[in-house]
Image: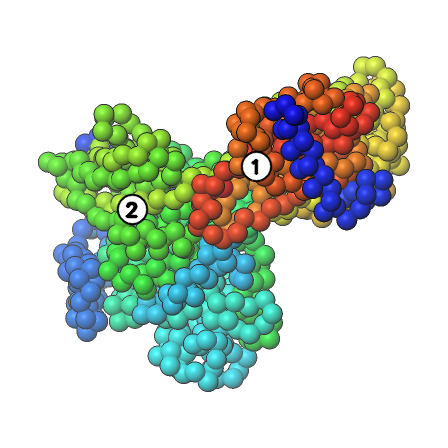
Amino acid sequence: MSAAATRGRVLALAIVAAFATAPLGLAQAAPKTTSGQRLAPLELDAPVSDESSVHGIPGARPGTERWIVHFASRSFELDAFRTAILARRPAVEVNAIVADLERAVVVDQAGFAGELERLRGTIVAQWWLINAAAVDIDPAQLDALRALRNVASVEPDRLVELAIRTATNANNHNADVLQAQGHRGLGATVGIMDTGQDSNMNGTGRPHRVYYVNGDPNNQTGGGLGGSRLLINRQIGALNADDQNGHGTGVASISAGANWGTGGADDGHAPLAGIAGYAIANQVSGGASSSTTMASAWQSMAADRAQYGIVAANLSYGGSPSPTNSAQRALDSAALNADIMICVAAGNSGPAAGSTSGSQGAANGLAVAALHPTSFVVADFSSRGPLSGDTTRFYPDLGACGVDTVMAARNDETGDFTASGTSMASPQVAGAATQLRGRFPALTALETKAILLSSTYDVSASNPGLDRNAFGMGALKNDRAHTVAAAGHFGTRALTTAAPLQTFTVPVVAGRNYGIAIAWYRIALTTTGWSNVDLSVRNASGATVASSATPRNLYEMVRFDATATETLTVRISLTSISGTTSQNVAFAWFEGPPRGRLEPFGAGCIGSGPIGPLCASFNGAGGTLTNQTSAAELAYDLTTTIPLTLAGFEIFSASNTGSPVTVSAALYGVTGIEPTTTPLATTTVTIGTTPGFWRGTFATPVNIPLGRFWIGIDHGATTTWVSQLTAGTANGAYSRPAFGAGAWTRSSLVTRSSVRATCALVPAVPSFTGTGTPTIGRAFELVASRAKPGTAGVLAYGFSNSVFAGGPLPFPLAAFGAPGCSLLTSTDVTSVIFTSPMGEWRSVLNVPLDPALGGAEFFGQVLIADRDVNALGFVTSNGLRIVIGG
């Protein structure tokens, strides 16, 4: 027997083995139905948001408004306080420093208080954390207020609105595996600045069980209120600290709650950590707060830092993007001086670019975007950068799960509170920081920030068309952050004008993936400028491997795949300095397995699977979706200058659920200038998770005359993105509430759709592709398409695309009756597949959570039974290289 014949026999046996495991014969095959197819040294002030306003919020006395006064100078600084905090001095010592600061601010502002009294104004709050005070004053006296000695500026107090089981598992942030190892936040405390905490659960006189050790109110070893882990619950705003809204209780349960016993309950990120509550709500409806209240809360938290061991904090409210806003100065001062890792919600005003006018700047903290769990697709509502008023500052900083989050419910221990928002994403990061610093107490907040950034998971593949102004540096991954800290891959260096460059080395291994981040604080809180530091990575020959030099972010990060096993030099370069003579910069680096990828290779051969040529389209090349939803049927405009016989269509869209979604679709003719009320034909289309063209096919081709026609898509469940591009040719759509019936109105949402119509069918080459990124502990999808409908096939996996049965690949199959067809992969594993009536097959593969799989590589190809084409009775697809990432 010849070598070719031997290899042909091996292939035949592989095909037979595949069909031997099939539950049905070819003639009886029941295909899975699916119908979709995815065809310096100079300090520069930055432009910032305008903080001017005609009025402040109403003051306590009728006829007055609340304004915040910033002073030009004062007689004291916070160096002693900051030094004591960083040195982990005893609480009694820090408390004494705080008492001195409280006395000093009263003395410093005494002259101002007297002058204010003559203007019939009243001091509402005095702050040592920032050089400012809040006052109530008749607005007619504002010019006189501005003219007082030592007054640098005045700012109107403003109203600020409120901006988990799956989230902590291996497919997402993976706090669970760390908790199983005993890392549960013990010894650390998270500060929750929100609507309050449920300290009197439904009138029982004790806190909600979510605050108790192991969720058990009988376990009173928590050291806080009623023996719980709720150490304090301070009222800062007008409302009682016993949560009147529910938002604060839910947020705390994400960061550090214990399992509260319902079917949807789970431990938060740090379930043994202390919780310090700061209630800032001034009204029940909406839980609104103000800049004055927030600044006072940050000062209170900073004062409590040493006594209660507060290492991280969360604020899930909106705010100001301006760094000179009083609440933002206080936030940045608390991070800088009290060593607190602060996390804020990025905002819920997406998906438009720059939708951050009500977002907190949080220059010294981390702003968090909301992601769908498991898929890590950015939520439609999550605000997008750049930061309003500071257009070269990327925003947000990272992402976390914030869609359909299950939380503890205020005054209810038998139910859940489920909500979506960046309010739910931010406490994921605060909880992760608490868990991390509980295990590694020597970490500073700045080092924690660098570690959390360096260890993020790259979500760009899940969000095509979007960039870091949607998801920051990636998704939070607790386990990777702990890997960085445990390996000692972090540190802090000081940069000065005399020594503006610091370096360290990183040994890398070819093929592995690396993330390196640096972070620093703004020091001068009264200005919009801060130090600028650049990051670059070089090899031994001096060539740059990766670099990052953003002009306005207070961190830099690079990701790269090592091309050689070598030692790289990381360069941290000071390009400008502000507010200090020595700028501390923290660094961290993460090493992971290669990133997963799906790479088609080789060519298939023509079968009898149908594909319709395009015969009408708008924006037929696709583009970037705006990621908007509409609870309606949308009929997308198309037009033709000749009569057509339509076989189907392709709509540019994506599922926003993390899984493919099948929706109804229809073809409409024209009545007057509108679509017909009744469809000419109906079908379904399965829309996958990646933006692209997804195909629907009509059971029978439909003849339409020249002129206008429409493709209707049922978006009513809001599980699919509207086909609306960020750029392209202008066109439109009609809308109605229910699919297939009712009156049409012109849609104001759709102005640039992307839709294509397909006509007479022609044979196609089977295609083998995939969606998602093959990654340890995550799922991705394999897709065979353009195949013969309703038939069987073989999925072949192998460990080589160069050798098969002792001979080279590709292996031509012409000698076996399939001219133009070739085997492209070894057939180490085979299985039977069945194509749908649309000529497709899909399968979701879950990669086990096994670190040994990182970097694993294998190859795949599908062989489709197609007796209409050749004597062998099979045609082949292209090959697909599959690399498992870490």
Q: Nearer the viewer, mark 2 or mark 1?
A: 1
Q: At label 2, which amino acid type do we have?
A: Ala
Vertical side of 843 occupied by 197: above or below: below
Check residue 608 in the rendering and tell me which mark sits there, or answer none: none
| Residue 471 rendering spot, x and y as whole percentages | 47, 42
Q: Residue 43: give x, y in percent of width and height.
A: 22, 35
Which element is circle 2 on?
Answer: strand
Instruction: Determine whether 507 is above or below 709 in the image.
Output: below
Total numbered badges shown on the rendered structure: 2
What is the CA distance from the residue labelled 2 to the residue labelled 1? Answer: 38 Å
The residue depicted at 18 percent of the width and 38 percent of the height is 502
Residue 867 in view in this figure: yes
Residue at the image position 60 percent from the left and 27 percent from the top: 824
Hey, which residue is sitting farthest front in the picture?
1
Q: Which residue is mark 2?
A: 588
Can residue 39 be seen at all in this image of the molecule?
A: no
Give whichever of 543, 279 is nearer the camera: 543
Q: Quadrant of residue 762?
A: top right
Q: Residue at x 22, y 39 (%)?
A: 505
Left or right: 50 in relation to 810: left
Does residue 355 appear to the left or right of 125 in the view shown? right
Residue 820 vertical placement versus 779 (above, below): above
Instruction: Say which of 534 and 101 sits in front.
Output: 534
Q: Which residue is mark 1?
A: 798
815 vs 717, nearest the viewer: 815
Occupied quadrant, residue 788: top right
